[in-house]
Image (tube, rainbow, N blue to C red):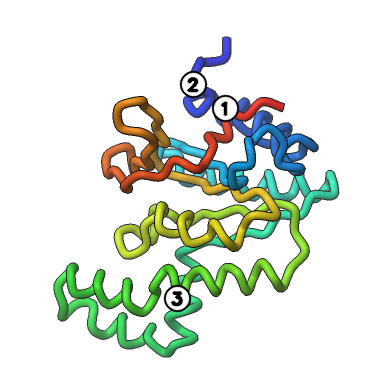
């Protein structure tokens, strides 16, 4: 019997739900969202990171066979690409052993500023390709210098035309008392973000 919380279901069951949901007209045409931004969260247990990476690749391949194109943006890979482009990569590697974690975090937050650097880089990729769905991943790898709620907040103006699905290693919780929050690794509350939908709660 399927668990009430689909995010805790076997990976094969989650894969079927994600494939059926993402390939549906209701999802692709952004129906039933009440004019909200088409942002979706796919929460998962951080211990399943390798399995989820495999699931994501399989999803992209299966969706392609259905004629649905996915634009994949891994925030960690994009961060390294941007650091190398700005010629900061070698400096980071050289200085990391010498500076504190706080100093490193501040340096990375400055070079990879979400509003002025990261979001325009994602937007450039979106503009360069024809796609039906945007997949965002690498969320855990870029913590704490890039916070997921900041990425979503800054993408709100740019990613309105196609659905965006963020693969999130943790929990996306809703409650009347505290609103909605992204809890990274199930422990770190990544501030408030309430404008996304849990993909497992989306009905076709």
Give residue 130's position: percent from left, percent from top: 77, 64
Q: Which residue is disc 3 drawn over?
A: 116
Horizontal and vertical percent position of residue 139: 43, 54
The residues bearing labels 1 and 3 have C-alpha atoms spaced at a distance of 33 Å
- Circle 2 packing at 10 Å, graded few (<14), some (14-19), many (20+), is few
Report, in whole angstroms, how far the alpha carbon at label 3 lies from the one at label 2.
Answer: 37 Å
Q: Quadrant of the N terminus?
A: top right
Residue pictured at 46% horizontal, 56% vertical: 153
Nearest to viewer (mark 3 / mark 2)? 3
Work out whether residue 27 or residue 75 is closer to the camera in this orientation and state it.
27
Quarter holding the C terminus is: top right
Q: Is residue 197 above or below residue 138?
A: above
Which one is closest to the eye, mark 1 or mark 3? 3
Please name which of the two marks, 2 or 1, marks the residue nearer to the observer. Answer: 1
Q: Residue at x 72, y 36 (%)?
A: 31
Camera-side residue: 93 or 194?
194
Q: What crowding class fits label 3: few (fewer than 14 Cα within 10 Å), some (14-19), or many (20 or more)?
A: few
As drawn, is 181 to the left or to the right of 36?
A: left
Q: Earlier in the sequence, mark 2 or mark 1?
A: 2
Q: Secondary structure at mark 2?
A: loop
At horizontal 60% and vertical 69% (from top left) the residue drawn is: 123
Relative to 7, is 93 on the left or the right? Answer: left
Name the residue beneath numbered marker 1: 201
- Residue hosting label 2: 5
Q: Are marks 3 and 2 in contact (CB under 8 Å)?
A: no
Question: Which residue ends up furthest to the bottom in the rendered image?
Answer: 87
| Horizontal and vertical percent position of residue 113 | 39, 73
Residue sitting at 83 percent across and 47 percent down? 65
Locate residue 116: give its quadrant: bottom left
Q: Is residue 190 above or below residue 80?
A: above
Viewer-proximal residue among 151 and 15: 151
In the displayed orientation, state which residue is furthest to the top. Answer: 1
């Amino acid at each position: 019997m399927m668990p009430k919380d689909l995010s805790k279901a076997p990976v094969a069951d989650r894969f079927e739900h994600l494939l059926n949901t993402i390939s549906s007209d209701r999802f692709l045409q952004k129906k039933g969202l009440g004019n909200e931004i088409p942002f979706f969260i796919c929460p998962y247990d951080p211990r399943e990171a390798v399995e989820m990476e495999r699931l994501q690749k399989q999803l992209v391949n299966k969706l392609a066979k259905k004629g649905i194109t996915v634009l994949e943006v891994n925030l960690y890979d994009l961060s390294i690409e941007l650091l190398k482009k700005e010629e900061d990569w070698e400096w980071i590697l050289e200085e990391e052993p010498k500076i504190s974690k706080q100093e490193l975090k501040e340096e990375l937050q400055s070079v990879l500023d979400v509003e002025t650097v990261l979001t325009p880089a994602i937007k450039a990729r979106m503009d360069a390709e024809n796609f039906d769905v945007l997949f965002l991943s690498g969320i855990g790898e870029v913590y704490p210098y890039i916070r997921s709620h900041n990425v979503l907040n800054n993408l709100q103006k740019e990613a309105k035309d196609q659905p965006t699905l963020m693969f999130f290693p943790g929990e996306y919780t809703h409650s009347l008392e505290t609103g909605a929050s992204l809890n990274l690794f199930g422990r770190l509350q990544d501030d408030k973000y309430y404008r996304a939908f849990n993909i497992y709660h989306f009905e076709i």
